[in-house]
Image (spheres, grey):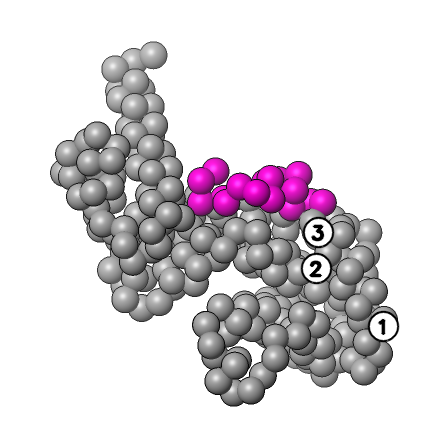
């Protein structure tokens, strides 16, 4: 091993130490309580050394989110490979997001937080690009499911690309989760948190897109059985990739 290779290995190990400790502090104290100087001290390094790895706190937060991207991609790849209808694969991706937020709330909150303007715009261009680059395989995988449904005659293309059509269900999935994470929002409007409501909305959207087979959203028994089956399938994949009692912030 050359001197430069040894230095690069040491730098990579030091960066992982900073990320591991940051994840630990976030899980214990919350995102807003994380400060760079105490983090460096907890790792027994000078604050300047920490800033050699991350230009700002925002930069570090994006690095934490990027680190979990590989787990999400592997999970999505396995969902795409399931022997189930294409329409159900879209629902399974939504189930996966639901389980991720249920079992790993620290990462779910962080992922929502880093895309706010105040964080995103204050992170370095290279960290932002890393997040965007990590998102491209995920986007390609979701749009690939849509493309396969179009090719199978299950979904009209509506004179849109597969990527354009994939945006609507993905926006509904992420948006509904973000609304639910806003404490007190549903209660303020007199809405009850119904575990099936997100999937009713998804089926309404997919029905409107004429994605076959259509589903009657008033058929609660069929919808319940469908989501329970998908949860069992996805939960097993989820468990194989990351133990359910371990937050991926600390992986």
Left or right side of 30 for 122: left
Label 1: few (<14), some (14–19) or many (≥20) C-alpha neighbours in 10 Å: few
Q: Look at 85% across and 72% down and name the residue there.
A: 221
Residue 96 rendering spot, x and y as whole percentages: 64, 56
Name which residue lies at 30% across and 37% down: 18
Up-down relation of residue 6 to residue 77 (above or below): above
Q: Residue at x 45, y 53 (%)?
A: 106
Residue 10 belongs to the span the image colors magenta: no
Contact between marks 2 and 3 (CB within 8 A): the answer is yes
Chain-order first, disc 3 or disc 1: 1
Res. 149 image quadrant: bottom right
Q: Judging from the image, what secondary structure is the residue with disc 2 in?
A: helix
59 lies above or below 121: above
Task: Tell whether label 2 touches label 1 (CB within 8 Å).
Answer: no
- Which residue lies under the disc numbered 2? 92
Q: Which residue is mark 1?
A: 221
Q: Which residue is mark 3?
A: 234
Instruction: Work out how far the residue at label 2 is from the one at label 3, CA to CA, in angstroms.
Output: 7 Å
Query: Is residue 245 one of those drawn in magenta?
Result: yes
The location of residue 194, given as percent across then percent down, is: 66, 75
The residue lying toward the viewer, choosing from 81 and 161, is: 81
> Range of the magenta residues?
236-251
Q: Marks 3 and 1, Cα distance to the nearest angstrom?
A: 20 Å
Residue lying at the far top of the rendered structure: 1
Asked if the residues shown at circle 3 and circle 1 are in contact, with their CB atoms under 8 angstroms apart, the answer is: no
Frontmost residue, 139 versus 238: 238
């Amino acid at each position: 091993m050359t001197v430069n290779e040894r230095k690069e290995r040491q730098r990579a190990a030091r960066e992982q130490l900073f990320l591991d400790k940051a994840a630990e502090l976030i899980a214990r104290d919350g995102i807003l309580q994380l400060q760079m100087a105490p983090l460096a001290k907890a790792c027994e390094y000078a604050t300047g050394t920490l800033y050699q790895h991350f230009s700002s706190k925002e930069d570090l937060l994006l690095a934490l989110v990027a680190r979990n991207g590989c787990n999400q991609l592997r999970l999505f790849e396995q969902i795409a490979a399931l022997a189930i209808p294409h329409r159900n694969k879209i629902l399974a991706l939504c189930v996966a997001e639901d389980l991720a937020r249920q079992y790993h709330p620290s990462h779910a909150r962080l992922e929502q937080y880093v895309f706010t303007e105040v964080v995103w715009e204050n992170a370095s261009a290279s960290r932002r690009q890393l997040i965007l680059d990590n998102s491209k395989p995920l986007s390609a995988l979701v749009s690939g499911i849509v493309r396969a449904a179009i090719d199978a005659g299950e979904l009209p293309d509506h004179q849109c690309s597969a990527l354009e059509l994939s945006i609507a269900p993905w926006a509904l999935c992420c948006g509904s989760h973000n609304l639910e994470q806003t404490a007190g929002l549903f209660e303020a409007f007199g809405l009850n948190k119904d575990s099936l409501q997100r999937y009713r909305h998804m089926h309404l959207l997919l029905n409107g897109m004429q994605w076959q087979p259509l589903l009657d959203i008033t058929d609660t028994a069929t919808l319940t059985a469908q989501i329970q089956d998908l949860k069992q399938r996805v939960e097993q994949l989820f468990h194989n990739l990351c133990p359910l009692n371990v937050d991926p912030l600390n992986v």
